[in-house]
Image (cartoon, rainbow, N blue to C red):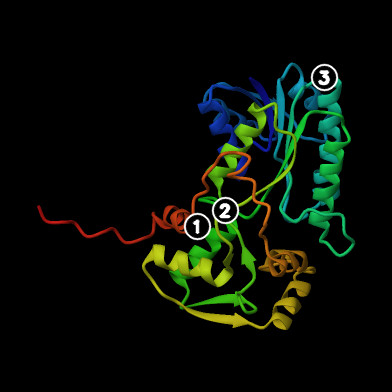
Amino acid sequence: MKIAITGATGFVGNAVLRRLLRRGHEVRALVRDPNQGGRLRDLGAVECVAGSLDDQDAVRALVAGTDAVIHLVGIIVEKGPQTFQRVHVEGTERLVAAARAAGVPRFVHMSALGARPDAGATSYHRTKAAGEDAVRGAGLSHVILRPALIAGAGNVPLEMMVRLIRFAPAVPVVGDGRYLLQPVWIEDVAEAFAVAVERADLAGTFEIAGPEQLSWDRMLDELETALSVRRMRVHVPLPMVRLGALAGQFAPELAPITPEQLQMLLEGNFTSANAIATTFGITPRSFAEVARDICAPYAPAPPVQPR
């Protein structure tokens, strides 16, 4: 198949791109940075289209003559003109319209676990839900995937946790640390996207997550085990965290967390409708295994066994 992909240079996109190439697909990627385009072409059968989702001509060139579109572009924090509305909603609407006009038969979209239009939801989750609506309303054969926290080397929050465990005498934890997450391995997510694009019988919205629901404290336990260390933990009261998050609105580069990120953390990120095994046939990897991979460059080497 010839597959158009957005977000190919990102954390998820790079894994999905490599998975598609290994399965023999041709890939056309939308890239904003020409230097990144050169790096992608080195991987194999990758054609690059320079531009962004704001560039209608580039979007049309991206989807022309393709068998499927995989849309992965998303942001976690708004910065300048890159707002949730502009990226998650308007960018998706533009891409869906171009795919429909070009007669692309398949559209696979990455949303997020927790996406919903509720007034009390974060603007991240509301705009993710609006992006889903744009896909559903286009009349295309589609699959929408809602991954939980995606775990693997390159995940910024997890790498920050690893740095704290390695270098800090004590690790700060927001509140009681009992909020639940269901981290899913990046390669399992990439496999789910490949299956979604290849199986024409699949249609609809699916939540995908790892095999276990873990508290933040339990995830720290697994990372410490992988690093062969133990650290004292300081549970920071929520009022103090909220105050710091609010102050960060005026100096975002200094804030470790935004008010919306805090809300999403406390809501948790888990599902009872995990489709990764039942629908996609994937046996998800445990977070303990993923933690060992993430920490492998820093963990002590095992002792050499005598001959």
Residue at the image position 86 percent from the left and 47 percent from the top:
130
Can you tell which quarter of the image residue 141 is in? top right
Which residue is at the front of the view, 42 or 161? 161
Nearest to N terminus: mark 3 or mark 2: 3
Q: CA distance from mark 3 to mark 2?
A: 36 Å
> Do labels 2 and 1 touch, CB within 8 Å?
yes
Residue 30 visible, this orientation: no
| Within-10-Å neighbours for mark 3: few <14, some 14–19, many 20+ | some
> Do labels 1 and 3 touch, CB within 8 Å?
no
Nearest to N terminus: mark 1 or mark 3: 3
Which residue is at the front of the view, 16 or 195? 195
Residue at the image position 44 percent from the left and 54 percent from the top:
289
Which residue is at the front of the view, 30 or 177? 177
Local SS, label 3: helix
Residue 227 visible, this orientation: yes
Q: Residue furthest left?
A: 307
Q: Nearer the viewer, mark 1 or mark 3?
A: 1
Q: Position of residue 252 (x, y in %)?
A: 73, 65
Q: CA distance from mark 2 to mark 1?
A: 8 Å
- Residue at label 2? 210
The N terminus, quarter of image: top right
Q: Amino acid at mark 1?
A: Phe
Q: Amino acid at mark 3?
A: Ala
- Residue at label 3? 102
Please state if 73 lies on the left or on the right of 127 as rendered.
Answer: left
Residue at the image position 67 percent from the left and 57 percent from the top:
272
- Residue at label 1? 287
Q: Amino acid at mark 2?
A: Gly
Q: Position of residue 260 (x, y in %)?
A: 77, 65
Which residue is at the front of the view, 162 or 250? 162
Nearest to N terminus: mark 2 or mark 1: 2
